[in-house]
């Protein structure tokens, strides 16, 4: 590109030097060598400028044809036709020089007619197919034609009908009118090209092409000034223009060079755009994705700029003015020259026919717009009816099936694929999980979950409509998707993005049989359908998230309820924690390890597929606390354990291969005991969440999900699941600690009860042993108290002696 830019800069400098040198030669030759030398230099310089411009245009065409870059065919045609037009102008200049040299002026008029018929169509086609412009409707070209003919008719009326301008003295009217007519034809052609270029500016020109179109417009403007001035001199002088006015020749020279120079800058802009798109495709590594024109414009960020210029509507007042002038001529002036009047009415008739043609195109465009409006209304109603049937569907899997079922039954597609991002509320990244659902008339449906940088992930991340050819990306497809596609005879699938409020949710893919094609109408309906289902999918996501939170909260409530129960055992609570943890985190395996005083972690409870399984508890190995602490730098925080270093290979192999892998890489030592057990159950990641009490390890919860044999669906845990495990294990740790404290208090209470019973037994035994000697003493005391007044004093003394 630097070489091309340098060449264009040299060409621009050469054009400037050529114009300056031509001007100096014309001025100096006229003053020093005479008019004939000046005329000869001008007649050589103008064709030479046309030849140089043609060479530049031909170079742009040749480079685009031989270049490996993808240059639009419109650009090649544009540069080729501009080169042809400039070559014709060069040939006309050379022919006029020869005619001037041999003094045969009668050939100048037919030569101008012939070259005008050839030059202006070539330049018109070159401008019409110029790259970087919007496509124009036929009615727009008709508007420019009407404006041009109206201006020509008004100018003809002013010059020939009104007595303001007279032919030069000594020239017959029959000789003057043909000269005037060819001058107006040349000027009208230049004005038509200028208005046509202005119409392109109105419709929009890409930013990268503005410089080249400014050069093109400047070249056309200079040619218009030169043709207008020379035409005036041709019409109002005895002889034809003899290239004796330097500024007219300089206008031609500069205009022709600018026309050729503009093609070089157009090629440079197109080459830069092609390189940018090529680099973008290489970055995306998606040569199998063919993006439509709208998507390509969006990728290049080279949007067209529009300018509000009243080009199309100006023909209406001009046509009214021309019609009024014709009426004035018929009613008031009545010019005796029939040739002048006939030419005026011919131009007016052409304008009238063009107006009728414009009305025809306007009617057809209005009919097409009405048809498009009705079609759009029908599409909206059809899509609204389909989406209305999905609003009440709350289950996510059922919703996906209904979405694809509607596409197949209502639109006649053979198969459909729904790609959705699981992390819908997070930015798209290489770690995003992709939910794939398929439905087909030919094979069984498929549902899987994948992750990683695949062609399907890149398709979603672009967020644009595209067509995916399976044969070009068969090696990048997940195993199950590849097998599903191979059972069908569908070579490609069209994907439509599903976007909700600027966030990419996924993409909807549709495909027909190999002999069928998706028409534009059906594609428009599917596009609208994809836009509408984005809201339904978003609501389903929110509903599923609310349900997940409800399950998680219910699991927490169950643990809290059992925590507040009157009687609770650690073993019973640990089993409850495993079951509720499996529900809350959608885990296939939940293993509860408790810490022993010997520095060991022993399995206490187990839940498999949300079911209690005490029979298999003994199969799980005992772990050492030191082994656990070696797995992470923060043993008191949950972390993700990568069971095997070859996870992708494991997902694509069979269970026998996994067993061999386990025996080879994980021998039966204690260091790999847990990993080996997890791999035997096809578990490739696990969350290890410690139960912490007062900053010390009290237990361990292991959450894991298994991968079915021969299934590329990967439901394994990842880093995004750790916060949920953290919330759950905090509540479980409190509950388990309280259960342990309750068990300790219960044990202490039982010990106190045993001590109290021993005390009571001792008191009973001691009382029995002391009761026998005291019985007689108690009897004597009772007798004295009862018969003290009746007994004599001697008897009392005798009793007291006995008691003493």
Image (cartoon, rainbow, N blue to C red):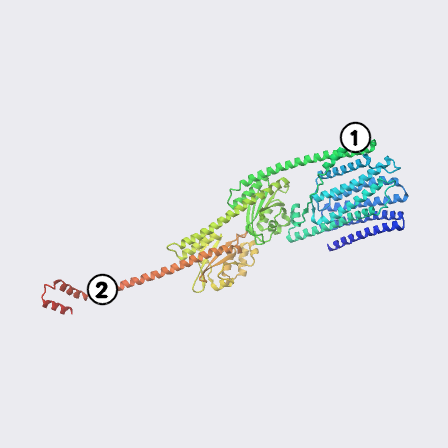
Q: Nearer the viewer, mark 1 or mark 2?
A: 1
Image location (x, y in percent) of residue 275: 69, 52
Question: Which residue bears the numbered disc 1?
Answer: 332
Classed neighbour count for the residue bearing mark 1: other residues with Cα under 10 Å, few (<14), some (14–19), many (≥20): few
Image location (x, y in percent) of residue 432: 56, 52
Where is residue 753, by image quadrant?
bottom left
Name the one closer to the observer, 369 or 329. Answer: 329
What is the number of the mark on residue 768? 2
Residue at (76% x, 42% y) in the render? 193
Q: Earlier in the sequence, mark 1 or mark 2?
A: 1
| Secondary-structure class at tag 1 | helix
Q: Quadrant of the N terminus?
A: bottom right
User: Looking at the image, can residue 670 be seen?
Assistant: no
User: Looking at the image, can residue 363 be seen?
Assistant: yes
User: In this rendering, would 423 be left or right of 127?
Assistant: left
Image location (x, y in percent) of residue 618: 44, 58
Name the one closer to the observer, 192 or 501. Answer: 192
Where is residue 328, by image quadrant?
top right
């Amino acid at each position: 590109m630097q070489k091309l830019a340098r060449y264009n800069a040299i060409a621009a400098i050469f054009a400037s030097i050529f114009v300056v040198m031509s001007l100096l030669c014309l001025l100096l030759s006229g003053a020093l060598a005479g008019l004939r030398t000046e005329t000869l230099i001008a007649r050589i310089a103008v064709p030479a400028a046309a030849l140089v411009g043609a060479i530049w245009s031909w170079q742009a065409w040749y480079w685009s044809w031989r270049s490996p870059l993808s240059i639009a065919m419109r650009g090649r045609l544009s540069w080729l036709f501009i080169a042809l037009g400039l070559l014709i102008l060069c040939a006309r200049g050379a022919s006029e020089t020869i005619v001037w040299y041999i003094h045969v002026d009668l050939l100048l008029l037919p030569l101008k007619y012939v070259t005008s018929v050839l030059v202006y169509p070539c330049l018109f086609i070159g401008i019409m197919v110029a790259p970087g412009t919007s496509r124009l409707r036929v009615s727009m070209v008709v508007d420019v034609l009407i404006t041009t003919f109206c201006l020509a008719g008004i100018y003809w009326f002013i010059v020939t009908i009104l007595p303001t301008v007279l032919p030069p003295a000594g020239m017959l009217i029959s000789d003057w009118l043909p000269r005037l007519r060819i001058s107006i034809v040349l000027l009208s052609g230049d004005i038509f090209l200028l208005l046509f270029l202005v119409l392109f500016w109105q419709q929009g020109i890409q930013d990268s092409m503005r410089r080249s179109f400014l050069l093109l417009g400047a070249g056309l403007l200079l040619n218009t000034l030169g043709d207008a001035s020379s035409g005036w001199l041709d019409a109002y002088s005895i002889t034809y223009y003899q290239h004796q006015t330097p500024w007219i020749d300089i206008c031609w020279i500069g205009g022709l060079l600018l026309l050729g120079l503009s093609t070089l800058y157009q090629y440079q802009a197109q080459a830069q755009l092609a390189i940018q798109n090529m680099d973008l495709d290489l970055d995306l590594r998606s040569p199998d994705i063919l993006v439509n024109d709208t998507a390509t414009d969006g990728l290049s960020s080279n949007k067209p700029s529009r300018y509000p210029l009243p080009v199309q509507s100006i023909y209406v007042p001009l046509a009214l003015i021309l019609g009024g002038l014709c009426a004035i001529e018929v009613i008031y002036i009545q010019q005796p020259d029939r040739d002048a009047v006939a030419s005026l009415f011919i131009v007016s008739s052409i304008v009238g026919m063009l107006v009728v043609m414009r009305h025809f195109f306007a009617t057809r465009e209005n009919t097409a717009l009405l048809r498009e409006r009705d079609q759009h209304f029908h599409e909206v109603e059809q899509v609204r009816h389909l989406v209305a049937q999905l609003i009440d569907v709350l289950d996510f899997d059922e919703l996906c099936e209904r979405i694809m079922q509607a596409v197949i039954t209502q639109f006649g597609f053979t198969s459909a694929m729904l790609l959705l991002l699981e992390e819908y509320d997070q930015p798209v990244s290489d770690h995003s999980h992709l939910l794939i659902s398929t439905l087909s008339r030919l094979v069984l449906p498929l549902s899987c979950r994948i992750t990683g940088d695949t062609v399907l992930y890149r398709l979603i991340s672009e967020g644009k409509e595209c067509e995916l050819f399976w044969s070009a990306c068969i090696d990048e497809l997940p195993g199950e998707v590849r097998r599903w596609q191979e059972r069908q005879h569908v070579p490609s699938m069209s994907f439509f993005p599903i976007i909700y409020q600027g966030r990419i949710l996924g993409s909807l893919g549709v495909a027909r049989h190999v002999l069928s094609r998706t028409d534009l109408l059906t594609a428009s309906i599917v596009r609208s359908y994809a836009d509408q289902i984005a809201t339904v999918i978003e609501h389903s996501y929110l509903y599923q998230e609310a349900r997940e939170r409800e399950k998680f909260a219910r699991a927490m409530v169950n643990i809290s309820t059992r925590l507040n129960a009157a009687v609770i055992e650690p073993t019973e609570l640990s089993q409850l924690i495993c079951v509720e943890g499996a529900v809350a985190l959608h885990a296939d395996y939940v293993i509860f390890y408790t810490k022993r005083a010997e520095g060991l972690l022993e399995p206490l409870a187990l839940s498999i597929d949300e079911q209690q399984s005490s029979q298999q508890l003994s199969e799980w190995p005992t772990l050492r606390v030191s082994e656990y602490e070696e797995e992470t730098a923060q043993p008191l925080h949950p972390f993700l354990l990568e069971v095997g270093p070859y996870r992708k290979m494991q997902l694509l192999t069979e269970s026998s291969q996994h067993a061999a892998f386990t025996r080879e890489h994980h021998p039966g030592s204690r260091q790999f005991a847990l990993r080996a057990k997890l791999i035997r159950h096809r578990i490739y990641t696990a969350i290890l969440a410690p139960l912490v009490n007062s900053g010390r390890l009290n237990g361990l919860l292991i959450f894991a999900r298994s991968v079915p044999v021969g299934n590329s669906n990967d439901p394994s845990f990842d880093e995004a699941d750790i916060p949920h495990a953290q919330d759950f294990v905090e509540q479980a740790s409190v509950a388990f600690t309280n259960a342990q404290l309750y068990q300790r208090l219960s044990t202490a209470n039982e010990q106190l009860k045993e001590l109290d019973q021993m005390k009571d037994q001792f008191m009973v035994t001691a009382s029995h042993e002391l009761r026998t000697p005291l019985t007689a003493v108690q009897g004597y005391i009772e007798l004295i108290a009862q018969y003290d007044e009746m007994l004599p004093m001697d008897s009392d003394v005798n009793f007291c002696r006995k008691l003493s």
